[in-house]
Amino acid sequence: MSCQNYQIEFTKQAQKDITKLSPKLKNKLKDILRNKISIMPETGKPLVGDLKGYYSVRLSFQDRIVYRIEHNCCVVLVVRAKTHYEE
């Protein structure tokens, strides 16, 4: 199945992460999701190890968007939208 645009969905954790972002980062997140990930989701960096099958895109110096692509239903599931470092 070939998808023109992927639908973006968020886990509860990703929704919680987004509420903690600054307005500037929220706008950047929206722009990346709308203009990059929903069109070509494989543009992110493929992750390895425990996160094999997930992709990552840099949001800021320490914040990352971590997501999984579900090709069969044209969905990108955002699982994290904040830092993976200690806060």
Image (cartoon, rainbow, N blue to C red):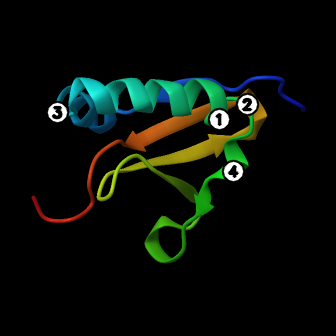
Nearest to the observer: residue 79 or residue 39: 39
Q: Secondary structure at mark 1?
A: helix
Upstream in sequence: badge 4 or badge 3: 3
Mark 1 to mark 4 CA distance (whole Å): 8 Å
- Left or right of 75? Residue 77 is left
Three-letter code for the amino acid on which mark 4 is drawn:
Thr
Q: To which residue does mark 2 refer?
A: 39
Q: Which mark is residue 43?
A: 4
Confirm whether residue 53 shows in the render.
Answer: no
Residue 36's mark?
Answer: 1
Crowdedness of circle 3 by 10 Å Cα count: few (<14), some, many (20+)? few
Q: Mark 1 and mark 2 in contact? Answer it, CB < 8 Å.
A: yes
Secondary structure state at the residue bearing disc 4: helix
Neighbor class of circle 2 (other Cα within 10 Å; few <14, some 14-19, many 20+) is some
**Number of numbered discs on residues:** 4
| Residue 41 percent across, percent down from the top left | 68, 42
Query: Can residue 68 be seen here?
Result: yes
